[in-house]
């Protein structure tokens, strides 16, 4: 009996001694489907590990060796309480603590997005602030979920089970190394792959996998570009040409248009002067329209080259941006990269044939399109006008403004007087449709004749009286009455019929002087009056008659 007891004591001495919190290795000796596994840790009894502690329970096999933590060495029934997760958790903390102390890195898989950053599984859950995810804080943190990255442990608090990681420091270090390598090996002319990192008004910054280069807006395309965003988008991948490298300042200038030949190099051969070209209106300015005839090549249609005949104030009156047009090449300046285009050259210049179509003496008709202070414009055909000067509207009437005899829209006949091709003018006459009554004025009127007519117009100096053959006579204010007249409108009205005597015929000025008060003069009085009138110089304005008549009245009063 004593021997047996001694043997039992001997066995207890050689049995492993386990304590709570200890991590040991165990072998799976039984698998209970979807529930648990039985683990032998070399003691007098086995322990149980729940199936929920395995990431992939279906892959667990008999004989697998795992690390477990002893939560309780033995309960009342003699069972040992084991935990696989706690063993891994404890081992991971020990590993992370060592990494943190040594300044090392750890691999981790991003589990999800939380407020302010990411949750990463590195054996334990750790936090990565958004500012530490990349060199620039990413706009979409969800894009990192499910990916595995290398992180640096920057903060560790085992008591609070708090781990803070940073990926930014590792990315920056990697970029620095790549930037140094790129600056060393890169030469102008290289074609490099890059990603659009940022877009500004003046260009775009391209990430060359470790080194940022500037792609200026002027080096993006040979054609017109108002803003880089019209051509590029952030995140877009593209091939760029290295134009210049400043290794001291670590600056690289890039180009995109340099991948293709400059379209202006052989511009004269492609678009000889006189060639018809098709293009799209890409810009409208007050002085003309820019037309893109091929990518990178624009020509200017000056506002004066839009029409032969129409006066176009601004190109937007006849063209729209984006409109497809045909034009003629007028000139090329390759050094300044300018092409002059014309739209009107597609049609025959109507002024080139105007002298053949409208020779002097041709009778024409058309609507009055416009009135000016000096004449009226008659539309001969679309875009081609002739002008009737006020002096060519009537043989007999002095027309001060064309509105006295015409109005806009009137259908008028006229005679072509002259075609001035150089100045693009056609002179017309209305009075030339009839004969000049002044050619036979002596047969129509003589000094001393008593005539009857109606007042057609009042002026401050007198009244105009309508006579036969569309001729007007002038009654000076001094010849209205024997009594002094201060205002002509006080004694005469337009349309009033009056009787007057012809007292002056001025052929040079084409004027007839009348006198209402002389209608009852005797022959002797008229002779005296005629002497005074003869003293007037040829062509002197009839307003001077006032002085002549005043002298006559004085003589008559003396007699």
Image (tube, rainbow, N blue to C red):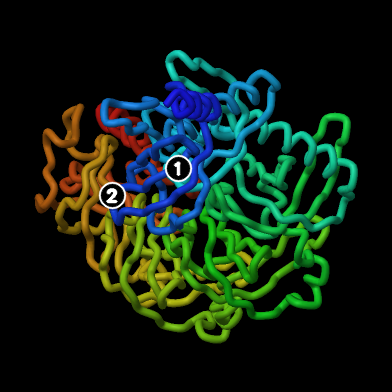
Q: Measured from the top left, where is residue 475 in percent x and y? A: 25, 45
- Number of numbered discs present? 2
Q: Position of residue 130 (x, y in %)?
A: 48, 29
Q: In the rendering, which numbered label is found on residue 182?
A: none
SS state under label 2: loop
Mark 1, residue position: 40
What's the residue at 63%, 70% (across, down)?
Answer: 293
In primary-sequence order, the first of circles 2 and 1 is 2
**Residue 149 position by quadrant:** top right
Q: Residue furthest bottom?
A: 356
Q: Is residue 126 visible?
A: no
- From this view, report whether residue 474 is shown above or below residue 172: below
Q: Is residue 139 left or right of residue 183?
A: left
In the rendered image, the quadrant that contains the C terminus is: top left
* Residue 551 picture location, percent across and down: 35, 31
Q: Secondary structure at mark 1?
A: strand
Q: Which residue is mark 2?
A: 35
Of residues 75 and 325, the one drawn nearer to the viewer in this rendering: 75
Q: Is residue 357 left or right of residue 366?
A: right
Q: Quadrant of residue 175?
A: top right
Task: Depth check: give the residue in front, 162 or 365.
Answer: 162
* In this rendering, position of residue 116 left or right of residue 167: left
Say if 1 sits above or below 545 in the image: above
Q: Is residue 554 visible?
A: yes
> Measuring 43% from the left and 55% from the top, which residue is drawn there?
60
């Amino acid at each position: 009996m004593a021997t047996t007891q001694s043997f039992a004591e001997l066995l207890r001495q050689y049995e492993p001694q386990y304590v709570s919190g200890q991590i040991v290795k165990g072998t799976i000796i039984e698998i209970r489907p979807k529930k648990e596994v039985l683990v032998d840790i070399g003691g007098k009894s086995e322990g149980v590990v729940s199936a929920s502690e395995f990431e992939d329970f279906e892959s667990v096999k008999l004989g697998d060796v795992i690390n477990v933590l002893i939560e309780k060495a033995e309960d009342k029934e003699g069972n040992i309480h084991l935990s696989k997760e706690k063993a891994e958790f404890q081992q991971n903390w020990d590993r992370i603590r060592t990494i943190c102390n040594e300044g090392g890195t750890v691999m981790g898989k991003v589990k999800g997005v939380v407020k302010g950053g990411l949750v990463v599984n590195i054996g334990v859950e750790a936090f990565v602030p958004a500012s530490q995810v990349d060199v620039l804080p990413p706009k979409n943190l969800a894009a990192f979920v499910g990916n595995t990255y290398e992180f640096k442990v920057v903060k560790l608090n085992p008591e609070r089970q708090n781990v803070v990681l940073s990926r930014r420091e590792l990315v920056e270090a990697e970029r620095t190394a790549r930037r140094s390598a790129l600056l060393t090996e890169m030469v102008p002319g290289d074609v490099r792959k890059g990603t659009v990192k940022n877009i500004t008004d003046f260009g775009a910054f391209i990430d060359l996998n470790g080194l940022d280069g500037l792609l200026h807006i002027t080096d993006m395309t040979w054609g017109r570009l108002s803003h880089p965003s019209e051509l590029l988008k952030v995140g877009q991948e593209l091939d760029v040409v290295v134009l210049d490298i400043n290794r001291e300042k670590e600056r690289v200038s890039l180009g995109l248009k340099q991948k293709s030949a400059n379209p202006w190099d052989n511009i004269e051969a492609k678009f000889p002067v006189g060639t018809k070209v098709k293009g799209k209106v890409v810009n409208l300015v007050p002085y003309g329209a820019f037309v893109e005839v091929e990518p990178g090549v624009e020509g200017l249609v000056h506002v004066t080259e839009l029409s032969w005949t129409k006066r176009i104030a601004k190109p937007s009156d006849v063209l729209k941006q984006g409109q497809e047009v045909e034009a003629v090449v007028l000139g090329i300046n390759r050094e300044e990269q300018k092409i002059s285009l014309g739209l009107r050259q597609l049609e025959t210049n109507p002024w080139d044939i105007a002298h053949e179509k409208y020779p002097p003496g041709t009778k024409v008709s058309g609507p009055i399109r416009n009135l000016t202070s000096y004449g009226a414009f008659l539309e001969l055909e679309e875009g081609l006008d002739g002008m009737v000067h006020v002096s060519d509207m009537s043989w007999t009437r002095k027309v001060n403004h064309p509105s006295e005899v015409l109005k806009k829209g009137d259908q008028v006949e006229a005679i072509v007087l002259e075609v001035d091709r150089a100045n693009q003018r056609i002179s017309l006459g209305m009075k030339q449709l009839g004969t000049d009554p002044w050619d036979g004025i002596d047969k129509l009127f003589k000094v001393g004749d008593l005539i009857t007519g109606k007042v057609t117009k009042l002026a401050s100096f007198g009244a105009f009286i309508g006579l036969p053959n569309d001729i007007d006579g002038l009654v000076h204010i001094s010849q209205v009455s024997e009594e002094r007249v201060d205002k002509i409108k006080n004694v005469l009205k337009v349309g009033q019929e009056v009787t007057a005597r012809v007292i002056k015929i001025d052929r040079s000025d084409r004027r007839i002087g009348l006198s209402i008060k002389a209608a009852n003069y005797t022959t002797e009085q008229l002779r005296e009056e005629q002497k005074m009138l003869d003293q007037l110089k040829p062509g002197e304005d009839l307003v001077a008659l006032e002085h002549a008549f005043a002298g006559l009245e004085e003589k008559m009063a003396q007699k």
